[in-house]
Amino acid sequence: MLNELNKDRVDSKKPRKEGLTSVVDRLQAIDKENFEILSPYIDIVKIYNVIPLLISEAVLEKKIKFYHDFDIQISTGSTITELTILENSFDKFVKEAAKLGFDIIEIAENNLQLDADQKKKIVNTILSNNLDFHWKVGRKDPTHQL
């Protein structure tokens, strides 16, 4: 109906380098018909928290394929990344994430502090597995809510 107004928007064509839209999948049911309508405007879906550890690989692969079929990149959440760093299993985690079809590893420092060498190693591990990364800046402070 409003295609004429929409045709010159900077965010109307994928793949985008700016104006990215990211949504969080909290394991809710997805209505494929409605998602088809929204998918041209969604660039990244983050699988929330440690959900990838709680569901079977088959379910996770199906979920990733669903989003990839709509040309949407899939990101881990930063909580699972921090957990694997703390448990010294980050390299294995990144390899598994790549194998399963994730595109992006999200990183934060809410529960750990990383020096420059550790950050460089993390980035190199991600890039060597042909994945991208998003580094969240800042810390969550439960005593100072927005």
Image (cartoon, rainbow, N blue to C red):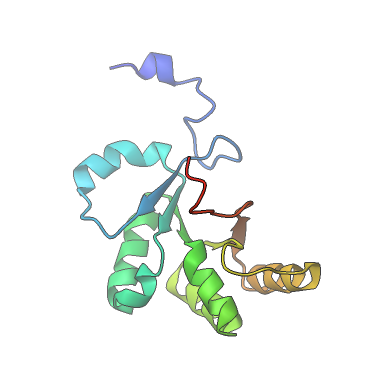
Q: In which quarter of the view is residue 87 placed? A: bottom right
Q: Where, quadrant-wise, is the N terminus in this rendering?
A: top left
How many numbered tags mark residues here?
0
Give the x, y percent position of residue 132: 61, 60
Residue 1 shows in the view: yes
Q: In which quarter of the view is residue 18 placed? A: top right
Please give left or right for residue 131 compared with residue 123 in the image: left
Nearest to the observer: residue 62 or residue 115: 115
Q: Residue at horizontal 54%, vertical 53%?
A: 141
Picture layout, residue 134 above or below residue 144: below
Give the x, y percent position of residue 23: 40, 47
Nearest to the observer: residue 37 or residue 46: 46
Q: Residue at horizontal 37%, vertical 49%?
A: 70
Residue 98 shows in the view: no
Please give left or right for residue 3 compared with residue 95 in the image: left
Give the x, y percent position of residue 76: 47, 63
Nearest to the observer: residue 142 or residue 8: 142
The residue sitting at the right extreme is: 117
Picture layout, residue 55 above or below residue 102: below
Give the x, y percent position of residue 29: 20, 55
Picture layout, residue 106 above or below residue 19: below
The residue sitting at the front extreme is: 143
Picture layout, residue 6 above or below residue 89: above
Nearest to the observer: residue 80 or residue 33: 80
Please give left or right for residue 74 compared with residue 33 in the image: right
